[in-house]
């Protein structure tokens, strides 16, 4: 078994640099990280996790708390977290909160009694004040639109800009009765609110006024809510000529409802979703969607967590990381 010193000599770097690549503890130049990782892979280097944990007082476990395990978006994201954690020799403990305030509160109160070195959580229910008052006892990184309040690192995308871009795309295609599906007045995580803000901003720039008749509530971001919301929009009066759905699952539900009402997509109603889940790529027609950089969400969140775990109490201000997105134009609109 090659030692870190052997690998450092082969790579032409310091032992500290090799250690940082192995642990993910600090930023390493991409070219250097790639060179060192190639040698680690070649020699089959396996760190002694038990010894390292005993020396450092760490477990090698991190927590990932997401609202829904069955959601395609969160399932894809969880897979990327597991892959990124494995590269850092971490094991991920995954929990489902179901958007329940008590479940989120339990995890953020000394991590619910679990022995993890850090926690990544996507909170849906807790208010900013409750997040600020929580005492997890380990580093925490937030995912999503909830403001970090200067206490935790946060990784998110600009949902306002993304929704604006999606709606603008529909408007530039000549659509004028653009509906929105996914308003969630019962939640406080900011996702639906920000996407509606971007939707309305695009309408305003085009000289159109938002109409309550074109904004549909959704109990969840799943297909059944999309079916129900689309049918409600169609029953209210003149059909919209375009729909921006706040998730791909909602868009797939809307697509189903439109077909059952003998409306063609995109000829009669153009349709844009959000998330770029795999199902949308194989729908008929394939779903136009906003694609967050999910790989970067996972990587940036894990790096934030690593920096906090390996450099605790260094007084570094919390980070608010915004990852990129892109609009993927396919057959639905």
Image (spheres, helix red, strand yellow):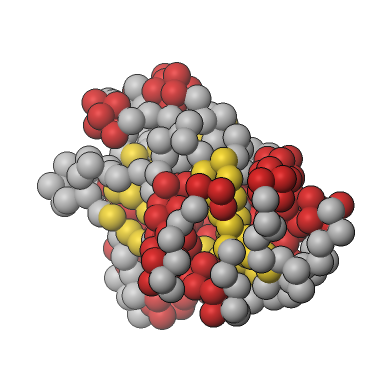
Residue 62 sits in quarter: top left
Residue 265 appears in the rendering: yes
Above or below, 194 relative to 42? above
Between 238 and 190, the one lying in front of the other is 238
Q: Is 115 left or right of 307, judged from the image as shown?
A: right
Residue sitting at x 66%, y 66%: 241
Locate the N terminus by quadrant. bottom right
Q: Measured from the top left, where is residue 298 in percent x and y?
A: 48, 56
Q: Measured from the top left, where is residue 111 in percent x and y?
A: 39, 26
Above or below, 64 relative to 270? above
Residue sitting at x 58%, y 45%: 216
Residue 287 appears in the rendering: no
The mark tally for this picture is 0
Q: Measured from the top left, where is residue 205 in percent x and y?
A: 38, 72
Q: Is 79 left or right of 306, judged from the image as shown?
A: right
Between 74 and 42, the one lying in front of the other is 74
Above or below, 208 relative to 80? below
Residue 228 sits in quarter: top right
Q: Is 224 left or right of 135, judged from the image as shown?
A: right
Q: Measured from the top left, where is residue 169 in percent x and y?
A: 54, 75
Locate the C terminus by quadrant. bottom right
Residue sitting at x 58%, y 57%: 179
Residue 204 sits in quarter: bottom left
Residue sitting at x 61%, y 43%: 221
Q: Is 226 left or right of 95, judged from the image as shown?
A: right
Between 142 and 216, the one lying in front of the other is 216
Residue farthest left in this picture: 315
């Amino acid at each position: 078994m090659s030692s870190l010193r052997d690998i450092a000599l082969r790579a032409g770097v310091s032992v500290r640099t090799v250690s940082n690549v192995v642990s993910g503890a600090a930023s390493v130049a991409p070219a250097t990280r790639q060179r060192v990782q190639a040698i680690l892979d070649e020699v089959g280097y396996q760190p002694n996790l038990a010894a390292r944990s005993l020396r450092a007082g760490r477990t090698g476990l991190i927590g990932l708390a997401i609202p829904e395990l069955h959601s395609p978006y969160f399932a894809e994201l969880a897979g990327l977290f597991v892959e990124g954690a494995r590269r850092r020799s971490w094991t991920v403990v995954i929990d489902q909160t179901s958007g329940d305030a008590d479940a989120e509160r339990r995890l953020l109160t000394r991590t619910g009694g679990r022995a993890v070195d850090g926690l990544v959580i996507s909170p849906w229910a807790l208010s900013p004040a409750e997040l600020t008052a929580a005492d997890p006892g380990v580093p925490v990184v937030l995912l999503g639109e909830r403001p970090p309040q200067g206490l935790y690192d946060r990784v998110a995308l600009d949902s306002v800009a993304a929704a604006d871009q999606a709606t603008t795309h529909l408007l530039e295609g000549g659509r004028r009765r653009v509906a929105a599906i996914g308003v969630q007045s019962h939640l406080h995580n900011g996702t639906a609110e920000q996407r509606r803000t971007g939707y309305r901003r695009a309408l305003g720039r085009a000289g159109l006024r938002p109409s309550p008749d074109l904004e549909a509530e959704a109990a969840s971001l799943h297909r059944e809510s999309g079916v129900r919301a689309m049918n409600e929009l169609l029953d209210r009066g003149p059909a919209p000529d375009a729909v921006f759905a706040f998730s791909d699952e909602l868009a797939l539900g809307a697509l189903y409802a439109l077909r059952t009402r003998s409306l063609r997509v995109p000829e009669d109603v153009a349709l844009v979703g959000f998330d770029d889940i795999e199902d949308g790529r194989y729908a008929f027609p394939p779903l136009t969607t906003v694609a967050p950089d999910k790989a970067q969400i996972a990587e940036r969140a894990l790096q934030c967590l690593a920096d906090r775990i390996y450099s605790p109490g260094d007084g570094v201000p919390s980070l608010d990381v915004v990852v990129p997105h892109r609009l993927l134009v396919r057959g639905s609109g």
